[in-house]
Amino acid sequence: MIIAFWISLFLVIYTFIGYGIVLYLLVKIKRIFTKTAEFSKTADLPAVSLLIAAYNEEDIIIEKINNTLDLNYPKDRIQFLFITDGSSDRTAERVREFREVVLLHEDARSGKMAAIKRAIPFITGDITVFTDANTFLNKNAVLELVKHYQNPKVGAVAGEKRILVEEKADASSAGEGFYWKYESLLKKWDYELYSNVGAAGELFSIRTALYPPVESDTIIDDHMIAMRIAEKGYIIAYEPGAYAMETASANTAEELKRKIRIAAGGIQSILRLKKAANPFYYPVLTFQYISHRVLRWTITPFLLILAFILNVVIVASAGNPLYQVTLALHVLFYMLSLAGLVFESKNIRIKAFFVPYYFCLMNYAVMAGIFRYFRKAQSAAWEKSKRK
């Protein structure tokens, strides 16, 4: 029982903190022996296709189009495609007002991955950039992404996701903002060591010629597209200078809905990405993939519960002071999380309590997502989340 407790606790700490420490140390060692890659400023810019899948976004779609048209990239080298499949509002009608944009619309709603697959034959660029309809890119985003393709080993480039957090943020804003700052740091180090292990749909790009076959029922298309390219032996680069900005979820209920969907997609992707989990192909990628993704999306949330239960049983049976301390830390953390829940319900906004609450919410979402996936209750059709 004691061994099981320490193994559980070790894996939990490694998943959320330890991997970051190990990764940082490995990167520091690598810096001793290798120099940071430099990019040519005179290299020819590749032809780019910017692909946006939008579902019932009439309130924001014009702002999004203007944002994309305003990107700092030669107009004769960029193509804009908007897919509005299944939209029942005026999204498609508003996109038609812009002659610079190629509109692809079908009344049927078959899911985002199906829409992307339908759009691929219309792409003319050497590089395809994917971005969400509810995010806004910085002006140099495309320029920053494409420079990495000067390295022939790079098959995809992930941009940075930034959450706009108010000074007096609620749990969904503060927690999501903190989570993505930490994620961005891990992604930066992942790439510096070898490769990223996925990409966020808010902003990422691929070599169009490497677009992989991805099943139409795929739940998290961005992650699967990028990882299928990594499974071919290419690197997924990371560029924080290219970023997509969006507001946080409207509330924790909306954030929970989004996280559960991602978790269901996470377990689906693990079952399908067999090559990425096999160290005999690309051992460093496998180490990064299991440490950064697989543990989070599979056993770690359950180990959190197991470690707590085992700690209670050990203290009740032995009363060892060491385990009394670990139990006290357990209880303190969950009390802070509970305080975050209470404060949110009363609209009292103290960020320090929201991070533990968001952490627990995130791990509950993983468990709920796993159960939903195996019950076949998760649709591949993208669900529009309410944002602030």
Image (tube, grey):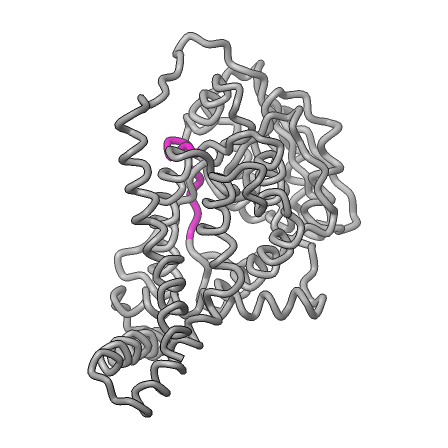
Q: Residue at x 36, y 39 (%)?
A: 189
Kindly tell me whether residue 202 is visible in this rendering. no
Q: The N terminus appears in which quarter of the rendering?
A: bottom left
- Residue situated in front as seen by the camera: 44 or 150: 150
Quadrant of the image occupied by residue 243: top left
- Image point 37% across, 87% down: which residue? 313
Q: At x 72% / y 66%, what residue is drawn?
A: 376
- Whether residue 128 sits left or right of residue 379 in the image: it is left
Main secondary-structure element of the magenta-colored stretch: strand
Left or right of residue 244: residue 343: left
Specify the quadrant of the image occupied by residue 229.
top right
Q: How many marks?
A: 0
Viewer-nearest residue: 110 or 107: 110
Task: Please provide the residue range marked out in magenta.
Answer: 238-247
Q: In which quadrant of the rendered image does the C terminus lie?
A: bottom left
- Percent position of residue 268, x then y: 64, 56
- Horizontal placement of 9 versus 108: left or right? left
* Residue 241 located within the stretch drawn in magenta: yes
- Examine the rendered structure and indicate whether residue 75 appears above or below residue 317: above
Q: Position of residue 201 (x, y in %)?
A: 54, 43
In the picture provided, is 7 more to the left or to the right than 111?
left
Query: Is residue 270 a member of the stretch shown in magenta?
Result: no
Q: Position of residue 277 (x, y in %)?
A: 57, 47
Is residue 347 shown to the viewer in this render? yes
Q: Nearer the viewer, residue 182 or 282?
A: 282
Image coordinates of residue 365 in percent, x first then y, are: 51, 67
Q: Residue furthest bottom?
A: 317
Residue 142 vertical position relative to residue 189 in the rendered view, above or below: above
Picture residue at 68% right of the left edge, 50% below the top:
218
